Amino acid sequence: MRTFRIPNRDRFLLSGLMLGLTFTMTDTAHASGSGMPWEQPLQQVLESVQGPVAKIVAVIIIITTGLTLAFGETAGGFRRLIQIVFGLSIAFAASSFFLSFFSFGGGALVA
């Protein structure tokens, strides 16, 4: 009968012990802000992307690119560029427009 031998058994056990101690002795992570200097500017950017001005701009871009695709005689690279702008405007509008459209505040409550 063949037995499975673990090479460097002492090193393997020591690594497992250290990993176990690391998991048991760490503090829990808190979801609150850490007061870093870049948090406030990033929060302002997020609020401006999801605000009412962003909704209006996104709707105008969607209408403009949709009409350009429908009635324009574009072909090749310019048509691809218009499709990319159309897709990006829908993606950016989804974070602010569609969530409020379906009365979803952006957070989920698990009961």
Image: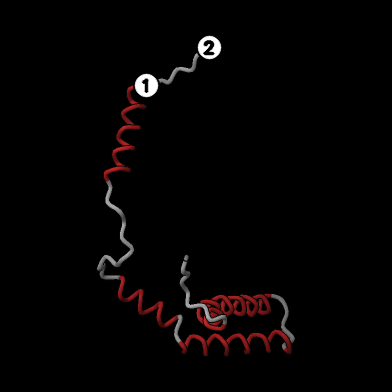
Residue at position x 46%, y 81% in the image: 50
For this rendering, which residue is in front, 93 or 104?
A: 104
The percent position of residue 33, horizontal first and vertical second, equals 29, 67
Residue 75's place in the image compared with 59, above or below, is above
Left or right of 110 on screen, residue 38: left
Q: Residue furthest top?
A: 1
Q: Residues within 10 Å of mark 1 (few under 14, many from 20)?
A: few
Q: Amino acid at mark 2?
A: Arg
The percent position of residue 87, horizontal first and vertical second, equals 61, 76
Label 2 SS: loop
Residue at position x 35%, y 76% in the image: 43
Residue 13's place in the image compared with 40, above or below, is above
Label 1 SS: helix
- Numbered badge on residue 9: 1
Name the residue that disc number 2 marks: 2
- Which of the two discs, 2 and 1, labels the residue nearer the N terminus? 2
For this rendering, which residue is in front, 29 or 12?
A: 29
